[in-house]
Image: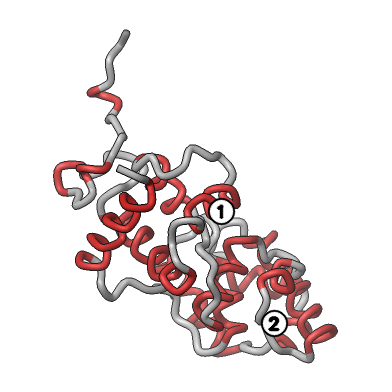
Amino acid sequence: MKKKDKINKILDILAEVYPDAGTALVYKTPFELMVAVILSAQCTDKQVNRVTTRLFSKYNTPQEFAALSPGELAEEIKGCGLYRHKSRYIIEASRELVKRYGGSVPRSRSELESLPGVGSKTAGVISGVIYGGSALPVDTHVHRIARRLGLSRAGNPAKVEEELAVHIPPRQRMAAHHRLIAHGRKVCTARKPSCGNCCLAEFCQYQPKEERSCI
């Protein structure tokens, strides 16, 4: 089966199983989403939402975050992993937004990636969710599933995105991103995936450790 046909079938199945998949992060503005996505690194969306519910009730604009010290913000977000690093990134990004964009979050992925703490995945999520961009952000779930299904062998997330995007139309990429994440969280987990309940089993090349040959 050609890769394009395989990907189309996979996406059709995921659309049936996860028709309403979308970001689980709670936000009201593009800036709040940016902060939430930065916080989500090595932290569950559920925990991020707990932290941001309190955080955004106190501060919710780039100007307000730009006025904070790293220590002040760190105290507010310490429920998330790497909170000291994230506090610096968020404050620096907020100051850049105020300085360069008048407090608005830019639309283009390249401009987003120029902000401190905003990598390719974060920029892709913001661009896709808020502005309808054509990104296909590759997080740990998307990367894992792409490898297990034989859709990409690349170790670099940017390369994985490049290889997948060749076969997925721009308007379908964010939906694919959300559905792959949903499947990765519910079924195709990093440890002990529920292979017996997987809707994509017929396409999978993954072999659980206990079933691998010792030869």
Which circle marks residue 106 in the picture?
Answer: 2
Image spot of residue 195 (x, y percent): 20, 42
Mark-to-mark CA distance, 1 and 2? 22 Å
Where residue 112 appears, as percent x and y from the top left, is: 69, 72
In this picture, residue 5 sits left or right of residue 198: right
Instruction: Determine the image quadrant of residue 126.
Output: bottom right
The image quarter containing residue 110 is: bottom right
Residue visible at 30% across and 26% down?
209
Please state, as top left, top right, bottom left or bottom right, where the N terminus lies in the image.
top left
The residue drawn where x is 38% and y is 59% is 181
Count neighbours of disc 1 (C-alpha within 10 A) and say few if under 14, some if 14 to 19, many if 20 or more: some
| Rendered view: 165 above or below 63 | above
Between 154 and 83, which is closer to the camera in this rendering?
154
Displayed quadrant of residue 113: bottom right
- Residue farthest toward the left in the current orientation of the protein: 196
Q: Disc 1 marks which amino acid?
A: Glu
Residue under the image location 43 percent in, 53 percent down: 142
Are the residues tagged 1 and 2 within 8 Å (C-beta)? no
Judge whether 54 appears above or below 162 on screen: below
Q: Secondary structure at mark 1?
A: helix
Q: Amino acid at mark 2?
A: Pro
Residue 15 is left or right of residue 63, and the answer is left
For the C terminus, the image quarter is top left
Q: Nearer the viewer, residue 71 or 114?
A: 114
Asked whether, in this view, residue 138 is left or right of residue 14, the answer is: right
| Residue extending farthest top | 215
Residue at point 57% right, 82% down?
A: 32
- Label 1 sits on residue: 162
